[in-house]
Amino acid sequence: MLRFLGFRLLRAAVTIVLVVSFAFLVLRLSGDPAQIIMGADAPPEAVAAFRQAWGLEEPLYVQYLRYFGAILRGDLGRSMRDGREAITLVAERIPATLALTVPALLIKLCIGIPAGITAALHRNSLIDRAVMVLAVAGFTVPSFVLGLLLVLVFAVQLGWLPSGGQDSWRHAILPIVTMGVGGAAVLARFTRSAMLEVLGQPYIRTASAKGVPWRAVVWGHALPNAAIPTVTIIGFMVGSLIAGAVVVESVFSWPGVGRLLVVAVANRDLAVVQCILLLVAATMVTANLVVDLLYGALDPRLRNAVRGA
Amino acid sequence: MSELVSIRGLTVGFGGSLALRGIDLDIGPGEALGLVGESGCGKSVTWLAALGLLPARARVSGSVRLGGAEILGAAPAVLDRVRGGRVAMIFQDPASSLNPVHRIGRQIAEALGLHQGLRGAAARKEARRLLDQVGIPDAGRRLDAYPHELSGGQNQRVMIAMALAGRPELLVADEPTTALDVTIQAQILELLGALRRDLGMALVLISHDLGVVADTCERVAVMYAGRIVEAAATARLFAAPAHPYTQGLLGALPPVDGPRRPLAAIPGGVPEPWAMPPGCAFAPRCPQRLPACTEGLPAAVALGPQHSAACLRAARELVPA
Ligand SMILES: Nc1ncnc2c1ncn2[C@@H]1O[C@H](COP(=O)(O)OP(=O)(O)OP(=O)(O)O)[C@@H](O)[C@H]1O
Ligand code: SF4
Ligand SMILES: [Mg+2]
């Protein structure tokens, strides 16, 4: 168990290092931050001074080593825009993002899972087809299109809800629904196929053959098995609580982490972008770790593997 | 009649084709019946249909009476009481027939709760006794094992223990040994025979191998393409098979004593359900075919006490012209 955990933690750390390194390189190879931040018409001396101040004139590998040294000391750098700590800037935005993503996650779970189960239990029925059509629609329509559609209908046409901003809870409704609907569709499809797979297994027939009433077959025998693959996708959704709102925050001008990321990328605000990506990688990796441990709890066949590893 | 189970005209269709084309079969209390036939002839479907275990899209008609009461199309609550409580069923692949995420003790206790009202410690005690009874060593500890921690043979014993939990009047064992090693096969068959004698329950042993049912069963029914083509007491069937298909199956058996000779397998294959030949389904492969055989379905005729066959030639030989 401990070895398993140690191995997983190591893998998690490597993943994070790779993500951060990749971001570091791409950001530096895709345009000069000094030029972008100072403006194209800035005097060359000013740009040079900016470079000097932020250590940008040094060779890439020196910058890279310095960056990692700082991270290990817990220093995630400062924004090149206003000089504040990147971590502070990001932390300020997290509550706003969670205010969207947490309710959206609840919608995904509360709609997606029951819809998927119902569809699987009534395969090829009207309910199943309706769920699948909605699921495919929710799955294929990109969230910015859905978001814009919702704005058109509920904000522009009906005038029931505001189209953007963060002044009251009413502003949060459309972005939450936009995210929740898409995610519920994904989860419904996933739950349905996991459930169908399980319902076709011989042990389900055994349960019926020994006289277990159908409801108890579904709850006691099918769901615990169907939960195993479904946990993967739920873990992914939990892992994107921080970073999953980039598109929707942009559509609804919601001042969360996602919008901060978009702005910081446009500005080549290196420390801020890297800080966000580090955070994203860390949440993803943590969620994955939890999923792996949950597998062990849900599936006794894996429990031994976990213990033995 | 005092039959325990009485099946009449049982017909099952999937999509456009018929998997069962009118099954008539009786099982007396405590009787051991072998149900034999090639893969796909409908042995499993017969009993899945009888217990209402086929998917909803299967079209089932006919009659299945248990102790005189019709159970085909009975209400779910009635069927739940019958399944496991009066008629239990075990399957071919024991490893995938047990729920992988539940402990064995829990799976047996579930059946005990449903059919005997036992819960908690009482259920556990009885589950342990059942595991002992089916010959699982160290039963107390095995209760807490998961199916993947046991061998195939042990899992089949667990399936049997679970089937016994409801004290059924009939146990349907659907190819219980096909997935197991030869030595384990013999042990499981022996166990089934012993349990039947000790508990006085009836047994239907499904197999594609006449040799498997010979020792365990008093009577054998041979199926071909969704029908029962011959039924007789085991000794009689082996001594005087009337249907050419049965004769072919017996010819394919290795002789128990005497020199080994090459198996005379029946040439040709089973017709697909959607391409049934007219008349006798066995006609394309039958070495004794008569011109009239392709004209109409041969009806089952009684050839002696407890012996019947659905074959034109057998019927004609019975009444010499
Ligand atoms: N759920 C199903 N859907 C469609 N067709 C089915 C289904 N179950 C069985 N069949 C068909 O019904 C026929 C009889 O199948 P059955 O399983 O009863 O054969 P069997 O005699 O038990 O053979 P085996 O020795 O392979 O188990 C086959 O043609 C099979 O394809
Ligand atoms: S009815 Fe005819 S074809 Fe069919 S088994 Fe008998 S002799 Fe052969
Ligand atoms: Mg079968």
Image: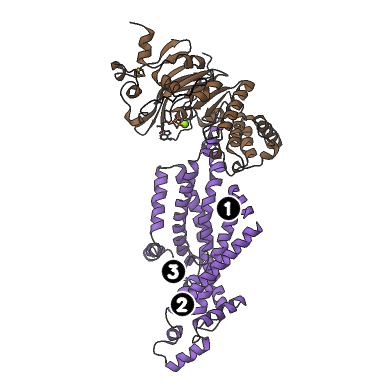
Camera-side residue: A67 or B122?
A67
Residue A13, how many percent across, how many down?
58, 67
Residue kind at label 2, given as amino acid type: Leu
The answer to whether B112 appears left or right of B204 in the picture is right
Q: Chain A is drawn in which colour?
A: purple
Q: Do the residues labelled 2 and 3 touch (CB within 8 Å)?
A: no
SS category of the residue bearing label 3: loop
Ligand 1 under 8 Å from disc 1 Cβ: no
Q: Residue A27 carries which label?
A: 2
Mark 1 lies on a secondary structure that is helix
Give the alpha-carbon distance from disc 3 to disc 1, as whole Å: 37 Å
> In the image, is residue A278 above or below residue A201?
below
Of the image marks 2 and 3, the number of the one nearer the N terminus: 2
Query: Residue B187 placed where, x, y %?
Result: 60, 29
Which shade of the palette goes to chain B? brown
Res. B70 visible in picture: no
Residue A135 seen anywhere in this rendered image of the structure? yes
Q: Quick check: is the Cβ at mark 3 less than 8 Å away from ligand 1?
A: no
Residue B5 horizontal side relative to residue B301, left or right: right
Tell me the quarter of the image containing the C terminus of chain A: bottom right
- Relative to A190, residue B184 above or below: above
Pick the residue in front: A277 or A258.
A277
Q: Which of marks 2 and 1 is nearer the N terminus?
A: 2
Q: Looking at the rendered structure, which numbered label has been put on residue A295?
A: 1
Q: Using the image, determine if residue B320 lies above or below residue B229.
A: above
Mark 2 and mark 3: Cα distance apart in space: 26 Å
Q: Mark 3 points at which residue?
A: A252
Chain bearing tag 3 is A
